[in-house]
Amino acid sequence: MRIIRVEHGGTSYYGILEDGLVFRLHQQPGHMEPILLSEAKVLPLVTPSKVVCVGLNYKAHAEELGYPLPNMPSFFLKPPSSIIGNGEPIVLPSGMGRIEHEAELAMVVGKVCRNLTPEEAEESLFGFTCANDVTAREVQKVDPLIGHCKSYDTFCPIGPWIETELEDINDLSIRCLVNGEVRQSANTEDMIFRPLDLLCFLSRVMTLMPGDVILTGTPPGISPIQADDVVQVSIEGIGTLSNPVEGPGPEEKILQ
């Protein structure tokens, strides 16, 4: 089932996307008529309390960055203000140097989660989607606190919808294309820590709220993006997230 979030008639809501029609979730009796997707404004999928990002979860990615393999999941937070939806532009900040894509499988939390057991993990999720953990790589090199390089507005594209039914999340192909050229290509079976194990681990650290997003790490092949590029993240069984790239605004002298 594909879930999207739309605005129609002055109201925003979640709906099931099927054959170009949006069926509103939790409608009252007598108000079951779907709307055309073309008649609605598609909104970013979630408004989470937090976006939790797992780092170095593919061995080859850790190696390309020159980092040792983690013996437990490492993570950081991106602000909710960094989220954009499918088709919205990634806006490059001025003066930040090299900006890179990072294709990732994202999990969307479906209920309040705290100290989950493995048996509880799967039923605690709303679904899965594609994400791009856009990163200002040169900022990362000069700022030891990773939050800066990950936190710019538009640096967390998510979409195109939330898929609630996947056969095996531990065996999904994941790719990133820039202007049609494959830059990243891997499989979730290459993860060091599996998605549901990450969910349990994070729930022991913090309370996860409905709508929170967990990015599960990026495979090798990260590379720079620039103005007028189109970046696509495709995950088997989910679909393709596509975002154009826009150039920087007024010059900012942050990197010296």
Image (cartoon, helix red, strand yellow):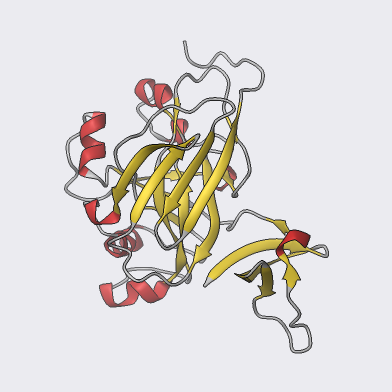
Does 68 sit left or right of 230 as displayed?
left
Position of 139 relative to 73 (above/below): above
Q: Tell how many labels.
A: 0
Residue lying at 40% horizontally and 26% vertically, measured from the top left: 137
In the depicted view, which residue is nearer to us: 254 or 43? 43
In the depicted view, which residue is nearer to us: 239 or 201? 239
Residue lying at 79% horizontally and 88% vertically, measured from the top left: 30
Q: Residue furthest bottom?
A: 29
User: Which quarter of the figure has residue 140?
Assistant: top left
Query: At which x and y percent is residue 117?
Result: 28, 73
Q: Residue furthest right?
A: 9
Q: Is residue 51 something that shows in the picture?
A: no
Q: Residue furthest top?
A: 256
User: Which quarter of the figure has residue 35?
Assistant: bottom right
Residue lying at 55% horizontally and 45% vertically, measured from the top left: 242
Residue lying at 39% horizontally and 29% vertically, measured from the top left: 223
Q: Is residue 67 something that shows in the picture?
A: yes
Query: At which x and y percent is residue 131?
Result: 47, 49
In the depicted view, which residue is nearer to us: 42 or 147? 42
Query: At which x and y percent is residue 249?
Result: 65, 22
Query: At which x and y percent is residue 2?
Result: 54, 68
Does 65 sit left or right of 238 as displayed?
left
